[in-house]
Image (tube, helix red, strand yellow):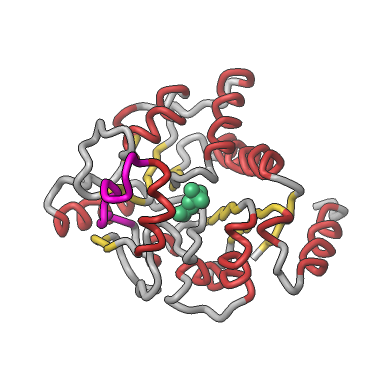
Amino acid sequence: MEIIIKSDYSEISSDSAMIVANQIKTKPNTVLGLATGSTPLGLYKELIQLHLNEGLDFSNVITFNLDEYVGLSNDHPQSYNVFMRDNLFSKINIKKENIHIPNGNAPHDKECERYESLIIRSGGIDLQILGIGSDGHIAFNEPSSSLGSRTRLKTLTQETVKDNARFFDNISDVPRFAITMGVGTIMEAKKILLIASGVSKTTPIRKAIEGPISSMCSASAIQMHPKTIVMVDEAAAKDLKEKDYYKWVYNNKKTLKN
Ligand code: PGA
């Protein structure tokens, strides 16, 4: 794991956008795995700016979102379809047919199989963006999710329902189920970029990076992934025991010529 500690959210947003942009420039038909939530909003804003100002070209990029709520229509303001459209897709030159988001209204088992095979048919995910939940989840892989799990229906924890209630009028409106890529699905991405910011992420980041690998914190599975970057700010990194060591490695690496 490469652990990069930035000073704040805005640095995470611009530096993670550079990683995504370089990936797209190197491989214009990159398959990107995308996340929703508050954390990647800054990254998406930066990508839009790179598209508008520097011509970053998404015309051959293919995307797969991690998850979607079950039971919300595709045009529901809190659906991840609308989130992605409003915060990224409508502002870049991506082709509609290259966008993939699980259909939370289709028969679940068939939809999950369809999604898994679509990912395989597209050649697999080149770079997967991840946030982390306060309960340590990646996508909606809540505590006790098998570390080998595939795309499937998951029941959200009470903590996740509470965390996401801020986007709905009433906590009772928050869906209780989602279709989500599994931990095993995510681990097959060729590269992973996990971003986290703020004090609400201090504990899950400590568990994910320095805790035991455990299904009780599905983000800890990234310790098994050979090409993962974890980019966090000082607040999220606050309780990392080896914080100084990670900074030492990062600063030394910057001096490498090749
Ligand atoms: P957040 O959510 O970015 O809104 O904090 C992250 C997550 O639940 O994965």
Q: Using the rendered image of the protein, determine whether residue 118 is visible from the camera's viewpoint.
A: no
Q: Front-most of 217 and 17?
A: 217
In this figure, what is the number of numbered marks? 0
Q: Find the residue positioned furthest to the top.
A: 53
Residue 151 visible to an observer of this rendering: yes
Rendered location of residue 109, percent (x, y): 15, 59
* Image position of 92 (left or right of 208): left
Examine the image and state in which quarter residue 39 appears.
top right
Relative vertical location of residue 30 with respect to residue 46 in this rendering, above or below: below
Q: Picture coordinates of residue 72 (x, y %)?
A: 22, 42
Residue placed most toward the observer, 177 or 25:
177
Q: Quadrant of the N terminus?
A: bottom right
Please, is residue 78 above or below residue 180 in the view?
Answer: above
Q: Residue at x 71, y 69 (%)?
A: 240
Quarter location, residue 152:
bottom left
Query: As displayed, is residue 171 above or below residue 42?
Result: below
- Judging depth in this view, the residue of 113 and 167 nearest the camera is 167
Q: Which residues are magenta?
A: 168-180
Looking at this rendering, what residue extends furthest in the left direction?
107
Describe residue 71's horizontal placement relative to residue 132 as left or right. left
Q: Percent x, y for residue 213?
A: 52, 78
Residue 165 included in the magenta stretch of the image = no
Residue at image coords 60%, 65%: 205
Instruction: Residue 182: give x, y in percent of width and height.
Output: 35, 63
| Left or right, residue 221 beside residue 181 | right
Q: In the image, is 216 to the left or to the right of 204?
A: left
Residue shown at 68% from the left, 39% from the top: 10
Residue 173 on the magenta segment: yes
What residue lies at 47% left-to-right and 29% top-to-bottom?
A: 58
In front of the other: 110 or 158: 158
